[in-house]
Image: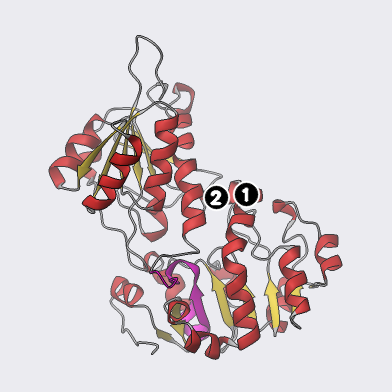
Amino acid sequence: MVIGVPKEIKDHEYRVSVTPEGVRALRQAGHDIVVEPSAGVGSGYSDDNYQSAGATLARSKEQLFERSTLIVKVKEPLLSECALFRPGQVLFTYLHLASLPELTKTLLDTKVTAIAYETIEAKDGTLPMLKPMSEIAGRMSVQIGARYLEKTQGGRGLLLAGVPGVEPGKVVVLGAGVVGSAATRIAVGMGAQVTVINLDLERLRSLDELYRGRIVTRASTQAAIEESVMAADLVIGAVLVPGARAPKLVSRALVARMKPGSVVVDVAVDQGGCFETTKPTTHSDPVYVVDGVLHYCVANMPGIVPHTSTIALTNETFPYVLRLASLGVAEAIRADAGLAKGVNLSAGNITCRGVADAHGLRFDPLM
């Protein structure tokens, strides 16, 4: 099979979908790999590294798409890239289509098979390719929030850790999954007062046991959310419904009641965000203000720590890339029900219920 590795063109996206080590392993398995020039430079991999591993450098992005059967990316394609797809081609990447109606329609029209990293399930029901980026985004969310609390960034002028005689800042984490747990870890480490809100009480019990009284846990109710958010200096949105839009937990009216200069970091922005005031931003223009509250809603947070992110991502994605290439897409999907759950679009049909429901379109089960 011919596997294409294009350069990511999303704003400040420096990750790459296959490393030179991955190229070497794919070549040993008998596959051809076409890499767009400078695709790996942001992550520390030169074109020479790829060529030494056995990849061919494409003359252009257009040639790469023309030659490749399987396109492996990091982030969803931009609309400008969609014209390069052809029917029957396979796209393997993060998609988050539930929050992207225009991209969904455009990809449906191309009749590609679109497999989303974020909806593939392991045998234990976990989401193996969402986990590493969620861990990174969760860790980043607190350090980013701490930065925007600085007065020079427009925030309250507050140090999360506090100092002797001055209480530390209050961090509220909405959700206790991978993102929320990672954010909690960093916030506790920085010395903040941390409240975690979640529906699953067993998950809250686990965190309570882990931190032994250093955090406050609250069952997710509207009253708990309102009380905690209004008292917060930093709120992390860490809610996930796999494949579907995130629920709106914080209304515009509640944002208006937050402390002036407080900060929201909505890591759920890929799936539409869990704040009513969320709208996607970029690393070039990451924040905006609503009712005096700073909002950071960058949809590719791990893209600016590409050395860490690329290795963490490809550790999880590469076995699937190799399986798709070696077995062929149809056989790989038949052999792995968890991989089949990653198929969001196929031959012009929506095969992920969460995506179909988000856009009010027909759902056609894959199997």
> Magenta stretch containing residue 220, yes or no?
no
Q: Quadrant of the C terminus?
A: bottom left
Q: Does the image show residue 172?
A: yes
Q: Secondary structure at mark 1?
A: helix
- Disc marking residue 308: 1
- Disc marking residue 302: 2
Q: Amino acid at mark 2?
A: Pro
- The magenta span reads 107-124
**Label 2 environment density (alpha carbons within 10 Å; few <14, some 14–19, many ≥20):** many
Q: Quadrant of residue 41?
A: bottom right
Is residue 355 shown above or below 45? below
**Label 1 environment density (alpha carbons within 10 Å; few <14, some 14–19, many ≥20):** some
Q: Residue at x 25, y 54 (%)?
A: 248
Q: Residue at x 50, y 76 (%)?
A: 115
Between 365 and 111, the residue placed more toward the observer is: 365
Q: Which mark sits nearer the N-terminus, 1 or 2?
A: 2
Q: Secondary structure at mark 2?
A: helix
Percent x, y for residue 300?
A: 52, 53
Q: Quadrant of residue 234?
A: top left
Percent x, y for residue 314?
A: 62, 62
Count of numbered labels shown in the rendering: 2
217 left or right of 129 in image: left
Between 288 and 39, the residue placed more toward the observer is: 39
Q: Residue at x 48, y 30 (%)?
A: 147
328 left or right of 175 in image: right
Q: Amino acid at mark 1?
A: Thr
Q: Does the image show residue 299?
A: no
Between 359 and 245, the residue placed more toward the observer is: 245
Percent x, y for residue 256?
A: 23, 36
Q: Are marks 1 and 2 in contact (CB under 8 Å)?
A: yes
